[in-house]
Amino acid sequence: MNNPLGNLEDDQEMPRFLISDLCAYLESYLSADHIREVYRAYLFGAEAHVGQHRKTGEPYIYHPVAVARILADMRMDYKCLMAAILHDVIEDTPTAKEQLADTFDGEIAELVDGVSKLSKIDFNSQAEAQAASLRKMLLAMTKDIRVILIKLADRLHNMRTLGVMKPEKTRRIAKETLDIFAPIANRLGINSMRLELEELGFAAYWPMRYRALKSAVTDARGHHRELVENVESAIRSRIEQEKMVGQVFGRQKHLYSIYKKMLKKKLSFSEVVDVFAFRIVVDAVDTCYRVLGVVHNLYKPMPGRFKDYIAIPKANGYQSLHTVLFGPQGIPIEIQIRTEEMDKLAESGIAAHWMYKTGEASGQWVKSRASDWLQNLLEMQQGVGDSVEFLEHVKVDLFPDEVYVFTPRGRIMVLPKGATVVDFAYSVHTDVGNTCVAARVDRRLVPLRTRLLNGQTVEIINSETAGPSPAWLNFVVTGKARANIRSYLKNLKTQEAVSLGRRLLERELELISLTLDDVDQETIDQILTEFRLEQLDDLMAGIALGDHMPMLLARRLAGEDLTQPVSESVLQQEVPAGSLAIKGTEGMVVNFAKCCRPIPDDAIVGVFNPGKGIVIHRQGCPNLGDYKKHGHKWIEAEWESDVEGEFATMIRVESGNQRGVLASVASVISQQGSNIEHVGSEERDGLSSTLVFVITVKNRQHLAKILRHVRSLPSIMRINRVK
């Protein structure tokens, strides 16, 4: 059978895994009794799947045997292999879970059931069915990690034979692989499986991009083959001179990681610095650091590109020293230095528990990190509503660009990049997160929304009477924090929510010299009808849960019409007609501050201003300082995902004092689809001048495009957005 994804290995034949081959291989590490049990599972599975064929035309049983062979390469135990051979019998045949338990045992039945999809329940959509099945599998994984290992092996073999599927199904399966299964393999530290899943998913989802990038990498390696050989030889020789023992391997950078880096940092292929990579495997940890000194003496290190994952391992247990050097001809090369055990664990992750039976501290670290993540999954499961929401929380935790911070006692906490103080609090314990009111980062008081950086020490300040705020959902990034906040808010007792909402509303009414008793019943009834609520207590509870803004309701209860346009102000500009730019502002007057002129994709904050509605500023705007004394007027704000219209912003252009510069700049701005609302000129000296433009743009990307084209004009010395 030819490889369906011929663009991966053009001339390679896909192997067929026969039970005789599997049993012969198992003799290398299983007893004869256990091999007989595996063969008994095969006979049961072959009979159950009799008459069934795969899209490739081969008997269906070939697939479960191939899955078992993948797990055998990971040295999995015999019950895991039996469950792998039987993994589709509940889903695709009349076989029941109870029959498996009777024929084999309950452990194998649970493993098979954990991998099986929920096919006998009606769902409203395919996405809901997929999410429910994944939720079932992930929760089964928390009881027995082998469930996910079987599923990963199943997905890997399916990806190897994906080319026989219809294009739309191929892309759907490939996307699910890249979004869910490859990240899970990474989270469990199984690097070898992750790399192949990513490679196959990349080739299936973006075949043209895959082929173009593969060709570019092949050409680059061909042109620099001699360079790679020289670097390997030079490192090897220098290590021998220092009387150390180590193996040096030149390796090709993983295509999907190159693609993600190009995409994330908007780099061309030639700008990706670590296409050339070398791995040095040594005998002991202290040798790793000595070898680091050797390579830094051999080639100049690139500033800011050294990472010590030995002292502080990654969340999945990965350990290694990473450094980037300026190699021969100034070409950047990446060096990874690790021990033999670290190298094994880097490839096998949690599977190393079965492969090497290691009792070393590093092996225990992998198991510990996996256990922490599984515990987080259980906590998230308890706090979410439907399966789709649960899956979204899981996805958040599967993509952690990591930040390492410390507790006051020196314990290392690993969080996703962009994590805030609140995320840290929930990572310590759910109760710590639910009751946090402030924090000290490196002994300085900071707001709860502060994003954490590597190496900081974080101390949480708690209050027993405090509770999560709905506003936290706008800045937390971990699935655990988000799930626990939502769970707390959903489970607030009705009377507590009513009491809290009433206090919030009365505080806002007091600012405009009113009480709730002063409001006539007709006005209250009108608002209840508008929000489709039955009684005033429902409105109060909605305020506590973040469904309604108390300062806006106070104005409505005072008889103000919030839908009327405000008068033109020196500091504000109105929202473009016909567009809803800010989430949650339906029916409200929204203005954009002219002092900082926010545009879509800017980080923003809203401030309630009586008579002017909600005024949106860019975060960090100097004028926000005036509102710090009135924190209750601050509103968490974010852009709608599909903002339309044009927004005014200001740019400053410094140019040579030449004739026609203004016309040239104006022409370029116009060509890029922007309108100039105002322009001013200020001559600095006889050689240069400064032009200030107020232009309209759709978003930050549109602005960046304009700046790039104006910057390319020969007379332009500098251009920037006015902050």
Image: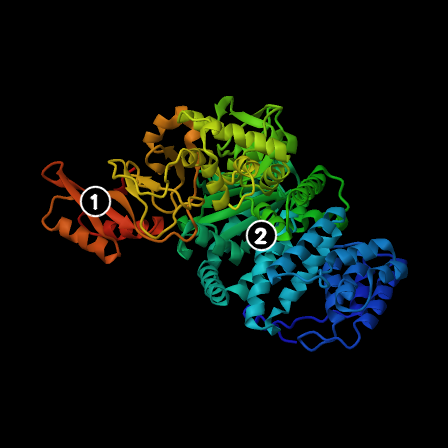
Q: Closest to the observer: 698 or 689?
A: 698
Percent of width and height locating residue 449:
49, 33
Badge 2 amino acid: Phe
Q: Which badge, 1 or 2, is on the more N-terminal residue?
A: 2
Residue located at (54% from left, 61% from top): 202
Image quadrant in which you'd find residue 538? top right
Q: Closest to the observer: 618 or 296?
A: 618
> Which residue is disc 1 drawn over?
693
Q: Is residue 567 left or right of residue 150?
A: left
* Render colour scheme: rainbow
Q: Is residue 410 left or right of residue 52?
A: left
395 over 593 or under it: above or below: below
Q: Closest to the observer: 689 or 20?
A: 689
Residue located at (24% from left, 49% from top): 711
Q: Secondary structure at mark 1?
A: strand
589 over 710 or under it: above or below: above
**Mark on residue 370?**
none
Query: Is residue 89 visible to the viewer in this orientation of the structure?
Result: yes
Residue furthest to the top: 443
Q: Quadrant of the C terminus?
A: top left
**Mark 1 or mark 2: which is in front?**
1
> Which residue is disc 2 drawn over?
249
Image quadrant in which you'd find residue 244? top right
For the image shown, how many numbered marks are present on the structure? 2
Percent of width and height locating residue 578:
34, 53
Report if the CB atoms under discs 1 and 2 are less than 8 Å apart: no
Q: Residues within 10 Å of mark 2 (few under 14, many from 20)?
A: some
Q: Closest to the observer: 221 or 125?
A: 125
229 over 366 or under it: above or below: below
Percent of width and height locating residue 82:
81, 60
